[in-house]
Image (cartoon, rainbow, N blue to C red):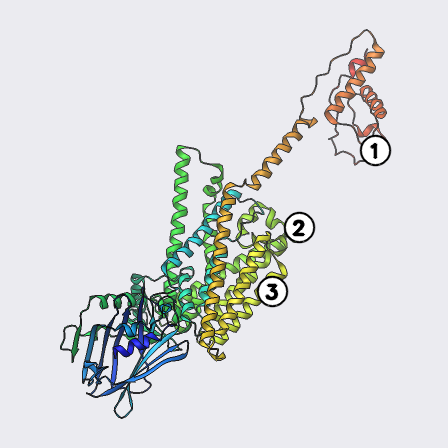
Amino acid sequence: MWRTSVVALASLALLPSVLATDILKTNGFSNCNNGSSTIKVNNVDISFDKSTEKIDFDVSGTSTQEQFVTAELIVTAYGVKVYNNSFDPCADDTKVDQLCPVPAGTFAANGSQVIPSSYTSLIPSIAYSLPDLDGNAQLVLKNKEGSEVACVQSGVSNGKTTDVPAVSYVAAAIAAGALAVSLVGAAASGAHPGTTSSSPGFFDVMFWFQGMVMNGMHSVNYPGVYSSFAKNFAFSTGLVSWGGLQTSIDSFRSHTGGNLTNNSYDYLKNATLVYPDGSTATTSSGIAKRALLLVARQVTTSVNGTSDESSSSDSQESHLVQGIQGYVEQLTIPQANTFMTVLLIFAIVLAAIVVGILLFKVILEAWALFGKFPKSLTTFRKEYWRIMFQTITNLVFLLYGVWTLYCIFQFTHGDSWAAKVLAAVTLGTFTALLAFYTWKIFTVVQKLKKMEGSADALFENKETWKKYKMFYENYKKGYWWLFIPAIIYMFAKGCVLAAGDGHGLFQTIGQLVIESLMLILLLWSRPYQRKSGNWINIIIQVVRVMSVVCILVFVEELGIAQTTKTITGVVLIAVQSGLTAILALLIVINSIITCFRENPHRKRRKAAEKHLSRDLEGDAFLMQPTPFSSPPRHDRKTSELGGYEQVRAQAFSRFGPRRDESQETLVTRGAEMGKAGYRSLSQGRSDHSGSPPPFSREPRLPDLAFEQYRHK
């Protein structure tokens, strides 16, 4: 049997991968017999190490009767049968003692055997390097009459996978970098009205990651290479694999109507996930456990449980999954725990935000007691409650689409009444919060249009800007309303994906329509103030549309060949990875620009202050008046005229010329005012066209010493 198995593995030049270097290994198993079976396989683990040329095996099961069987091994790659061979476990060249005959009761065998190089040399080197390729091996046992008595199938892997923890860490680092750049940019702008943030920002990156997660949740036959890749971004939607958290949720569900028999963390740890196309997968904890057992065991056999090393305790369950369930349970998160997992992670992040803001407030207060902190932090110190509430609102806006998805999924697949109540309350609260802000902004816009004729004050008034900018700060003034289609877009995506779970064609077509409508809206409006924002968001949306088109290839109803699906999956990974790398590069560029470029608002403010300073230096109203000095007494007529000229010059320097008077008229008027004493300027002309002064408030000129000339 083991020689035949190696021959089968030799044909797996294009088969999948999951665990180590230069190793071919089965990846979980499932019973594939359709009717009743007299033999039940509880565990199958077979691995071949190229460096030692040994096969390690671990097989166990139960049989209702002793019987002689023949075995048929079938290997498929990308839906194509690449190997098919029958053998007799009692034949000399393929003898397996534990199956000749199959004993009544339990049986188990595990150990290792050396494989001749004539068989191992048939395995091409590419079989050890290609990641997550689609293929499986199926073993069928038949009795002497030709009736099927057992059937077991398993995926085959080579140790390479696109599900790599480092990818998740890098993606998280990209998101953290985008958040840091956004915060630094916001602090540098000082909440200046009309300020825009650089693209891509934190929201752009997180929405992009969430889109890739949702792409991996459709109820379609994904190639293994893509389903593993999509797992790397689960953190962006609040899905975190945490054993202690899952155990607590299981306990909560068990007390509120939940059924833990086949829907719990402990069950998933030992389960093999089986997808509709027959491919199998195991959770991370299950992979680690079985790998440890294979390393530790020596060659042992048992019949009817007589050996201490009987593997019946390690038996695994086959668990059929698809769609959202298939995605979350790869992360060892039971489908019924999905919403509660996201809720608790949200609560942890929320608590961290509140504690962080309050702690920073305390630090500022202590700083104020012992020193003087920068003026840029004054706003935070005075308005930290507003900042805290707006930060929470931003978090709600960020998660609204996936929150809708998980809440509807909880309504349709959850088994805990308490979790359903929490889903309804939180979804209603989040929707009400966004609806409240929408109503407030519309109310403000209506008032502004009545008073000013436009809604420009949304971007120009500082107080209005600080209250509502989180929804429209990057949009042009005429497209402030675009946040409403964005909310509807997120809600519709979550609804279609969750409500259509199990119906891949409906999900994919619905998502394609939604993504296409958003792309058309962006192309038509180009609403972002910065050209870079328009281009980046349009490119992201184009890739989203292309991604859904690629997912359409995976729909089972279309009957597209498995090889085409795998190639499409690789192309999809390349496109999404390339865009992610571009976003990361742009974030680095933006961070450099933010750190070294002078704040444009500060630059404009300095220029305005400099200009104002020049204006003030030349402002006649703020200059010190020149004291009046009497002319010499020796020439009365000349001195009188000179005095008038001096008076006119002083009045001109202090008040400027009258727009409706010439130089001669000013001299004449000055003489008349000197003779008349304190008289109103408006009373000196009968043709004065201005409005009469208010009662008892006639404007008067100051005493310009005309009296001394009149009495002389």
Report x, y in % for residue 429.
46, 61
Q: Nearer the viewer, mark 3 or mark 2?
A: 3
| Residue 126 - label | none
The residue beneath circle 3 is: 520
Report x, y in % for residue 608.
62, 36
Report x, y in % for residue 234.
40, 62
| Residue 688 - label | 1
Q: Residues within 10 Å of mark 2 (few under 14, many from 20)?
A: few
Q: Amino acid at mark 2?
A: Met
Left or right placement of residue 425 versus residue 289 in this view: right
Spatial CA distance of label 3 from label 1 is 63 Å
Label 2 element class? helix
Q: Amino acid at mark 1?
A: His
Along the polypeptide, which appears first: circle 3 or circle 2? 2
The reply to whether the C-beta atoms of the residues labelled 3 and 2 are less than 8 Å apart is: no
Q: Amino acid at mark 3?
A: Ile
Label 1 element class? loop
The residue beneath circle 2 is: 451
Question: Up-down: is 55 above or below 442?
Answer: below
In the rendered image, is residue 207 in sight? Answer: no
Foreground of the two, 32 or 452: 32
The reply to whether the C-beta atoms of the residues labelled 3 and 1 are less than 8 Å apart is: no
Along the polypeptide, which appears first: circle 2 or circle 1? 2
What residue appears at the point 36 percent right and 72 percent down from the top-left corner? 415
